[in-house]
Image: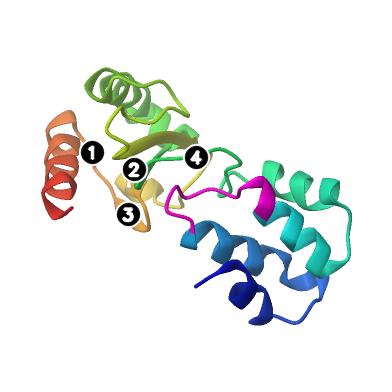
Amino acid sequence: MDREAILKKFEPNLSNILYIMHDLQDTNPERYLSKEDVEACADYLNVPYSYVHSVASFYTMFSLKPRGRNIIRLCESPPCHLMGAHSLLDYLKGSLKVDVGGTTKDGMFTLELTSCLGACGVAPAMMLNEEMFGNLTPEKVDAILDKRRKEI
């Protein structure tokens, strides 16, 4: 779906800003809001560019720079931290050869942190795109990422 079609799905009401931004980002092959997306959203909602940009930069679910085809969001909440998320973060950074916010050279994965996934009972947890995984170990993470590599 192109940018114009996405905008037309919604009334030009400021209460639709998050829905519009999600759809714009989800249809972008690099999974981010481009400058043109932000401008189009601002024009459509009749608000300043800076307003849409500030919303996009406030929420961690949005990105203003290109990302990989798969977004890994590792939870860093206190329960996940206590159950080993920091060690998993070190493992992921080494395994993927990226830092937080970085994308693998092949464009397959972007590594991000999130403050809470609401999965404290299965800490440490992460999301891969929209799928939740818990009770993670380095071996489980490897299996999850290997499976994703084979699916594409």
> Which of disc 4 and disc 2 is earlier in sequence?
4
Q: Secondary structure at mark 1?
A: loop
Residue 46 or residue 126, whichever sits in front: 46
The amino acid sitting under disc 1 is Leu
Q: Magenta stretch mostly in which secondary structure?
A: loop
Bin the neighbour count of mark 3 within 10 Å (Cα to Cα): few under 14, some 14-19, many 20 and up. Answer: few
Identify the residue under disc 4. 66
> Which of disc 2 and disc 3 is earlier in sequence?
2
Say whether marks 1 and 2 touch (CB < 8 Å): yes
Measured in 3D between alpha carbons, the distance from the residue under mark 1 to the one under mark 4, in whole angstroms, is 27 Å
Residue 1 or residue 133, whichever sits in front: 1
Residue drawn at (67%, 52%) of the image: 36
Measured in 3D between alpha carbons, the distance from the residue under mark 4 to the one under mark 3, in whole angstroms, is 22 Å
* Image vertical order of residue 73 relative to residue 23, above or below: above
Say whether marks 1 and 4 touch (CB < 8 Å): no
- Residue 149 located within the stretch drawn in magenta: no
> Which one is closest to the eye, mark 3 or mark 1?
3
Residue drawn at (79%, 77%) of the image: 12
> Which one is closest to the eye, mark 4 or mark 3?
4
The amino acid sitting under disc 4 is Pro
Q: Which mark is residue 125?
A: 2
> Which of disc 2 and disc 1 is earlier in sequence?
2
Say whether marks 3 and 2 touch (CB < 8 Å): yes
Identify the residue under disc 3. 132
Query: Magenta segment range?
Result: 28-36
- Residue 35 located within the stretch drawn in magenta: yes
Measured in 3D between alpha carbons, the distance from the residue under mark 1 to the one under mark 2, in whole angstroms, is 6 Å
